[in-house]
């Protein structure tokens, strides 16, 4: 599992593999804040060029599109290289601690 990629990326097309992918680019227009726009632009290029879109989808979600959101991750195994993953949406909210749940021990 990777961690969130913090830099900017740009889109490129590989004519040999016929895939649309991303690469790290300090002057790139896309980052983790506008990853939805990145996915839309990649799909647009893939449709226009008739290439496939290179994204990571976990095995249990292959063939499903609902409930998945695009996330820009860094692959630490390959030096932090960015990749686009389609992961299930998770709500990361913390529960509110009530004063009745807190016990002073000291």
Image (spheres, rainbow, N blue to C red):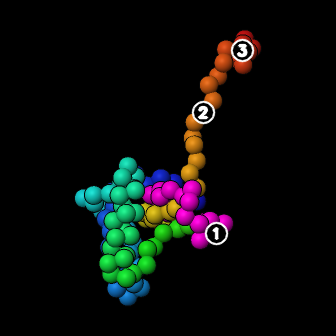
Mark-to-mark CA distance, 1 and 3 = 43 Å
Instruction: State whether residue 1 is above or below residue 105.
Output: below
Q: Residues within 10 Å of mark 1 (few under 14, many from 20)?
A: few
Mark 1: secondary structure: helix
Q: Residues within 10 Å of mark 3 (few under 14, many from 20)?
A: few
Mark 3: secondary structure: helix
Q: Nearer the viewer, residue 6 or 79?
A: 6
The spot of residue 43 in percent (x, y) is 38, 70
The spot of residue 54 in percent (x, y) is 45, 73
Give the residues drawn in magenta, as a range. Answer: 58-76
The disc, 1 or 3, on the residue closer to the chain's N-terminal end is 1
Mark-to-mark CA distance, 2 and 3 = 17 Å
Q: Residue at x 33, y 65 (%)?
A: 41
Name the residue carrying label 1.
59
Q: Nearer the viewer, residue 50 or 99?
A: 50
The spot of residue 58 in percent (x, y) is 61, 66
The spot of residue 30 in percent (x, y) is 32, 57
Name the residue carrying label 3.
100
Left or right: where does residue 58 sit relative to residue 84?
right
Q: Residue at x 48, y 69 (%)?
A: 55
Look at the image and tell me in which quarter the C terminus lies.
Answer: top right
Does the magenta segment cover residue 93?
Answer: no
Quadrant assignment, res 101: top right
Q: Nearer the viewer, residue 21 or 45?
A: 45
Instruction: State whether residue 63 is above or below residue 30.
Output: below
Quadrant assignment, res 15: bottom left
Count of numbered marks: 3
Does the magenta segment cover residue 72?
Answer: yes
The disc, 2 or 1, on the residue closer to the chain's N-terminal end is 1
Q: Looking at the image, which residue sits at the far bottom?
A: 16
């Amino acid at each position: 599992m990777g961690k969130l990629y913090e830099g900017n990326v740009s889109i490129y097309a590989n004519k040999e593999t016929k895939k649309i992918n991303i690469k790290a680019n300090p002057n790139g227009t896309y980052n983790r804040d506008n990853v939805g726009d990145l996915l839309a632009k990649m799909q647009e290029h893939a449709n226009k060029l008739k290439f496939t879109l290179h994204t990571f989808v976990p095995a249990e979600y292959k063939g499903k599109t609902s409930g998945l959101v695009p996330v820009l991750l860094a692959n630490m195994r390959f030096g932090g290289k960015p990749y686009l993953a389609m992961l299930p949406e998770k709500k990361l909210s913390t529960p509110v601690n009530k004063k009745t749940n807190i016990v002073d021990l000291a």
